[in-house]
């Protein structure tokens, strides 16, 4: 698998796309493949705040359900409302239309604890 080079990753299979102090969060291609066909995504509310490691919501699939963990601390500034009616976007385009939410970072130093693509790839092989 080739993971996008511009993203950062967690060992819980979330990705982060950093744009200034806003981080777009989703699950990786590997994670969605492991879950199978996604049937529901539980999203937080805009304005909710989370600490690094908190559960942001749940992804339900035919095979299993899995928590989504916050890779960084901050406040939710946007959710992907398209997932309410089309949760399968996480399967078909996890890095584009299947993103889950955006968080405004409260501590940029937390980005240092995330993995670059090569390090993430090493955790799943």
Image (cartoon, rainbow, N blue to C red):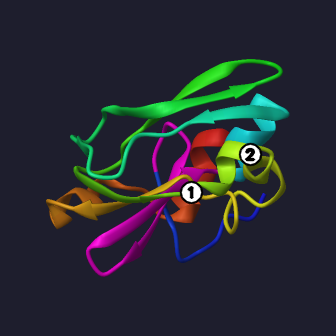
Residue 119 to residue 49: above or below? below
Label 2 close to label 1 by CB (< 8 Å): no
Q: Is 9 part of what is drawn in magenta? A: no
Nearer to us in this view, 119 or 60: 60
- Name the residue tied to disc 2: 85
Whether residue 38 is visible here, answered yes or no, is yes
For marks 2 and 1, the one nearer the N-term is 1
Cα distance between the residues tagged 2 and 1? 10 Å
> Range of the magenta residues?
10-28
User: Is the residue 110 above or below the residue 125 in the image?
Assistant: below
Residue under pointer 1: 80
- Residue 33, percent from left and from top: 80, 40
Rendered view: 114 above or below 14 = below
Q: Position of residue 65 (x, y in %)?
A: 65, 20
| Residue drawn at (22%, 56%) of the image | 110
Percent position of residue 118, x then y: 57, 62
Say what secondary structure mark 1 lies in: loop
Q: Going 24% across and 54% down the picture, which residue do you hit?
A: 75
Q: Residue at x 70, y 57 (%)?
A: 94
User: Is 69 on the left-hand or right-hand side of 62?
Assistant: left
Q: Dot 1 surroundings within 10 Å: few (below 14), some, or many (20 or more)?
A: some
């Amino acid at each position: 698998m080739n993971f996008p080079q511009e993203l950062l990753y967690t060992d819980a299979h979330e990705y982060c796309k950093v744009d200034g102090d806003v981080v777009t969060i989703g699950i990786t291609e590997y994670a969605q493949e492991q879950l199978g066909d996604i049937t529901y995504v539980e999203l937080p509310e805009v304005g909710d705040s989370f600490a690094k490691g908190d559960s942001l919501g749940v992804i339900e699939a035919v095979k299993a359900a899995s928590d989504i963990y916050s890779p960084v601390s901050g406040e939710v500034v946007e959710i992907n409302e398209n997932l309410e009616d089309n949760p399968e976007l996480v399967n078909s385009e996890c890095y584009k239309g299947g993103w889950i939410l955006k968080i405004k970072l409260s501590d940029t130093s937390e980005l240092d604890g995330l993995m670059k693509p090569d390090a993430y790839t090493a955790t799943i092989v």
